[in-house]
Amino acid sequence: MTQNKKTDEESPRAGPSRPARLLDVARLAKVSRATAARALGGYGLVTEETRERVAAAARTLNYRLNEAARAMRAGRTQVIGVVLADISNSFFASAARAIIDTCASLGYQTLIVNTDDDLKTEVEAVQTLMEKRVAGMIVVPSSPDHNEHLQKAGAGEGRMVLLDRRIADIPVSAVTTDDRGGAREAVELFIARRHTRIGLVVLTAAATSHRQSEPRGAVSSARDRVLGAREALAAAGLDLPKAWLRYTPNNPQMIIDAATSILSADPRPTAILATCEEIAIGVLAACRALNLAVGRDVALISFDESPWSGALTPAISVVQRPIREMGRAAVNLLVRQIQGGESGRDVEMPTILIDRESVFDLAP
Amino acid sequence: MTQNKKTDEESPRAGPSRPARLLDVARLAKVSRATAARALGGYGLVTEETRERVAAAARTLNYRLNEAARAMRAGRTQVIGVVLADISNSFFASAARAIIDTCASLGYQTLIVNTDDDLKTEVEAVQTLMEKRVAGMIVVPSSPDHNEHLQKAGAGEGRMVLLDRRIADIPVSAVTTDDRGGAREAVELFIARRHTRIGLVVLTAAATSHRQSEPRGAVSSARDRVLGAREALAAAGLDLPKAWLRYTPNNPQMIIDAATSILSADPRPTAILATCEEIAIGVLAACRALNLAVGRDVALISFDESPWSGALTPAISVVQRPIREMGRAAVNLLVRQIQGGESGRDVEMPTILIDRESVFDLAP
DNA sequence: ATGAAAGCGCTAACAG
DNA sequence: CTGTTAGCGCTTTCAT
């Protein structure tokens, strides 16, 4: 026991397989652990010469910081939590791609949770992520009303950024798109092509069956798109009868039913705005079943560009949103909050209307 | 300093916000940390009565194990790494959904890395994940040849399961589908509908420009699909001229070019098998540009069911693969390896041919 | 059956 | 400018 001081020296790690620790680096560089930490971490005071010796030692030993240890010490991890409805949905998948890559480039891991737009699952997910001491989270909120869990998480230690959907009156910044403007432009295009009977199929997590009136829990992006469409309609003195507006949850058959119901109205609309890719697919399916030709009998514009929209015959016109940029922006905003403590302000990104063949001109 | 023993007792954690530690639970239950750990962890010997007292204490304090501390102690995390080409691709997105959910239900986090099917990126990703001490990884290998990095990771501490693609001669189990059988059935359907000029567009990460001959780095799934198609062709005494077979990397324009080139051959095939969704989209686009109608001029079968395949006019026939089940199986296999030490064997799942309208009957 | 105590690898407050 | 040292919360011998 008297020789304990030398124990370190006498027990080099067994086998070359075991990864080097900070202590190993310090020893090789002939400095203390503290100095090595300072040199590597780039904080505190260290001579240039020492710094280099330590760096060299780290390189030869192929040293990599043990993140578990750091996380434990710091009481928080290098993980960013992402709470979204469903990663297999193409919008979220694209956003996730951007988020993951941006996080990786900034040294963060990304932990993804699917909620299927269920509020209870979301609350639990946020709770769990806080317990896991994530550095921050990016949340696509499933509801515009219930936000206590977001308040709590966003206000406290855990930083938060909302994606795709805003929530009024809470101090959490959001990255969204100009959904209202996008919808307005889309409807304006219909009108310019002389359509006057214009229908809307809207996806909402909140709707439990297809309905005409706006469901309570409609999320900001859905609401804004309806709002924008109504604006354009009103500006042209056009009406939006209840029979031409349907809300539907994200279920293939229910979407088809909603679209079918609109297209079976008398008179039926000659143009339809679909608030997302899933809706557009449902409209396509409904048209098929009703033997209506998109681009000839029914004009169609969908939100969100996807790989197939330009490949179909007719090619589908879309309101394109900068999904990758949104994901990137969300991460940057969040990381700035984590590191700098800045609150950061909301970001709203522009949409682009891509006019293809699905919007035909309705001769007068 | 003499009173140090009592320090613990005298300093309850500041504020109720700070999460409870094991020590807090132990104190409330009037046992030592060790006993509390045993009771909660369900190992070692503990009286039933003590166990219950500890459980109750944990419940009242809302205790949750600090994973960072556990990870540090254990030298490994509760994280499963997933290395795939691109999470925004619909096949991988669906697989990821299943993987994430299954992992979550088993208490694992999922860390996803995108490689864009680039070998160098993949090698780095595997390396990084090992350094992060993940419990195991699920890899979609970008190449059938270069596998030293997988060998090293899979053989050592880090457990590994391959997804979607096999690699010969390495002791790492894989979850795949019967791509060969699927392709065979697809071509047999073409033949049953009296098609004799059948073309193939194949996606390979390895191809640098579209080519007729099989590129060296073709991944097992791509190779098997070609193999299956050739089998069916051969069984019917049919030929596959070079002009009707193209390999292309995953780039929209290059895919369209490949499809266009096949459809411009003289004579041109009346049926085309697309090895994945992206290829199908490219074929659709090429047909559009060449003014050829799918389902009338060109029969089409694609691998992988997607939301739009049934909604198009004509509805597209597909070789459906059980993507969710594949993801689930991969996680289960991996976790069994992690926990039980079992090696686990390869899993090959069946495909289902869904016959819709894109395969018309070619009257003799 | 239970408790005391020794670390896992890292950081930071403090002393030189 | 550098070293000493004390933990972060958990697990796991080794005593009792």
Image (cartoon, coloured by chain):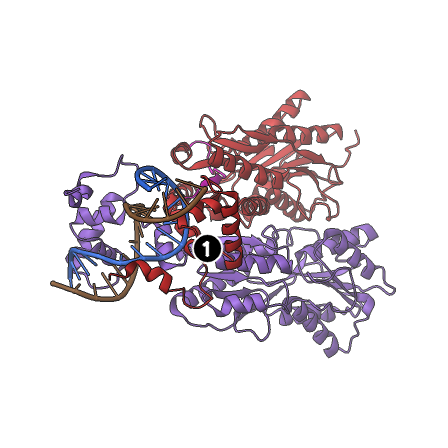
Chain colours: A purple, B red, C brown, D blue
Residue B181 or residue A219, whichever sits in front: A219
Q: Is residue A22 magenta?
A: no
Residue B313 or residue A29, whichever sits in front: A29
Residue furthest to the right? A266
Q: Position of residue B207 (x, y in %)?
A: 48, 38
Q: How many marks?
A: 1
Q: Position of residue B297 (x, y in %)?
A: 73, 40
Q: Is residue B141 magenta?
A: yes
What segment carries the magenta color?
A: B134-146
In this rendering, position of residue B29 left or right of residue A240? left
* Picture quarter with the C terminus of chain B: top right
Q: Which residue is mark 1?
A: B25
Chain identity of mark 1: B
Q: Which residue: 73% across, 71% down? A: A191
Q: Is residue A100 visible?
A: yes
Q: Please tell me whether residue B198 is drawn above or below residue B80 in the rendered image.
A: above
Amino acid on which disc 1 is placed: Val
Q: Position of residue A233 (x, y in %)?
A: 74, 74
Q: Position of residue B193 (x, y in %)?
A: 76, 31
